[in-house]
Image: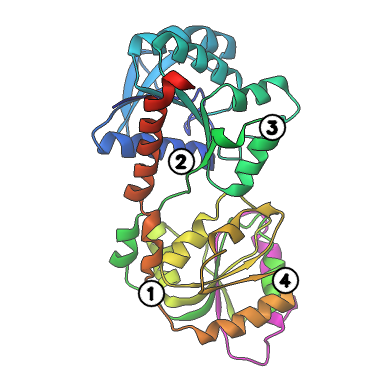
């Protein structure tokens, strides 16, 4: 299958979770044998044509992020490429209109990948065009899907495709020392470790240990808070950590606690669940984390620090695991199949859309 991906801004321009997901999809499609080109603004030195990096074939539409020029040139370039499917990012939303025109010229269906972190103005006409022009809008969670529908997308024109993980890596990493609780998130204003610490402080008379993964501008403040609550002797801050180090900690941990205010998809929670952790999620209005564990037995949903403390205690009813096969369905290969099935469905029904 020939796939045209459209994103004026790549991770080389703006490193966001949505852009990383989009480029990971480009690599996975290429590795699976599909012909894939990502149409973008040039970010590399040299001739403004094609450039390959990290397994992705990039095609420069413009030599810089000049939106008007990008949108004027894109339709004809897509038509000449002759893709079987066009898959675009919604930011900036004007590129969706241009990609749609390219799809009309190429007689090709188009879908939009809406992760949730685009930061678009929901009142702008162009934003609403970005959800109504494509044949389908893909989101990583029900929370983001609801936001897209509120912008004007029809229910039948939206689909959830979750984030994915390398499940084989879970087995490949040896567990680290056992801890009772693990937590992972950039230590910024949305981390909300206060809830976890207040819950742990309720359990001072019990024997427990906790590991905090992540770094950021609020780390010093969180370390001071642990000290003020007199739990710092049992809370270890280990920094950002790479994927293997995180997995080793998750495989050694009994429970993973999710309290962050904002999660378009709770990827670290997913990794931890796959590594056998009991999931404890504090409900947040701007987080989709609770969706992951909605029908999962080894989990707890809470709304305040006292309930969180109770859940940490109650998690002891479950055996310690270091891998959980339930989450194999989120492996990269399984989720990639969801994308290719969507592509096939769009192609087969394009004449009727």
Tell me the CA gap for discs 1 and 2: 26 Å
In what element is the residue under mark 1? loop
Q: Relative to residue 71, is residue 296 depicted above or below?
A: below
The region drawn magenta spans: 200-229
The numbered disc on residue 31 is none
Mark earlier in primary sequence (1, 2)? 2
Name which residue lies at 58% across and 90% down. Answer: 207
Viewer-side label of 4, 3: 3
Dot 2 surroundings within 10 Å: few (below 14), some, or many (20 or more)? some
Tell me the CA gap for discs 2 and 4: 34 Å
Mark earlier in primary sequence (3, 2)? 2
Q: Are marks 4 and 3 in contact (CB under 8 Å)?
A: no
Tell me the CA gap for discs 1 and 3: 41 Å
Dot 1 surroundings within 10 Å: few (below 14), some, or many (20 or more)? many
Give the residue furthest to the left.
33
Give x and y (percent) for residue 120: 67, 31
The numbered disc on residue 322 is 1
Q: Relative to residue 165, is residue 194 depicted above or below?
A: below
Mark earlier in primary sequence (2, 4)? 2
- Look at mark 3 in the image and give the residue it sits on: 151
Viewer-side label of 3, 2: 3
Q: Quadrant of residue 285?
A: bottom right
- Look at mark 2 in the image and give the residue it sits on: 21
- Look at mark 4 in the image and give the residue it sits on: 225
Give x and y (percent) for residue 68: 58, 10
Mark earlier in primary sequence (4, 3)? 3
Residue 62, can we see it? Answer: no
In what element is the residue under mark 2? helix
Give x and y (percent) for residue 70: 52, 12
Closer to the camera in the image, 14 or 86? 86
Viewer-side label of 2, 4: 2
């Amino acid at each position: 299958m020939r796939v045209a991906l459209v994103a004026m801004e790549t991770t080389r321009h703006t490193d966001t979770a949505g852009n990383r997901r989009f480029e990971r999809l480009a690599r996975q499609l290429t590795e699976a044998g599909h012909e894939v080109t990502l149409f973008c603004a040039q970010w590399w030195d040299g001739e403004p044509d094609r450039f390959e990096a990290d397994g992705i074939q990039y095609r420069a539409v413009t030599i810089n992020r000049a939106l008007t020029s990008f949108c004027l040139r894109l339709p004809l370039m897509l038509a000449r490429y002759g893709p079987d499917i066009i898959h675009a990012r919604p930011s900036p939303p004007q590129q969706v209109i241009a990609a749609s025109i390219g799809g009309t010229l190429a007689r090709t269906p188009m879908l939009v990948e809406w992760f949730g972190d685009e930061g678009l103005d929901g009142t702008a006409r162009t934003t609403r065009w970005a959800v109504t022009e494509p044949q389908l809008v893909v989101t990583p969670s029900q929370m983001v899907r609801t936001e897209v529908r509120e912008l004007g997308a029809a229910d039948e024109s939206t689909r959830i495709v979750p984030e994915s993980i390398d499940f084989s890596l879970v087995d490949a990493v040896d567990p680290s020392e056992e801890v009772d609780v693990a937590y992972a998130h950039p230590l910024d204003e949305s981390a909300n470790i206060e809830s976890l610490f207040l819950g742990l402080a309720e359990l001072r008379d019990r024997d427990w240990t906790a590991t905090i993964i992540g770094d950021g501008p609020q780390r010093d403040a969180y370390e001071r808070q642990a000290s003020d609550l007199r739990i710092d002797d049992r809370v270890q801050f280990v920094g950002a950590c790479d994927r293997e180090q995180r997995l080793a900690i998750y495989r050694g941990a009994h429970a993973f606690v999710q309290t962050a205010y904002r999660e378009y998809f709770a990827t670290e929670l997913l990794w931890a669940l796959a590594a056998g952790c009991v999931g404890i999620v504090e409900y947040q209005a701007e987080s989709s984390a609770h969706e992951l564990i909605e029908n999962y037995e080894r989990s707890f949903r809470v709304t305040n620090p006292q309930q969180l403390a109770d859940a940490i205690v109650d998690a002891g009813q479950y055996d310690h695991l270091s891998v959980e096969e339930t989450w194999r369905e989120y492996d990269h290969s399984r989720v990639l199949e969801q994308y290719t099935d969507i592509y096939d469905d769009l192609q087969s029904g394009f004449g009727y859309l």
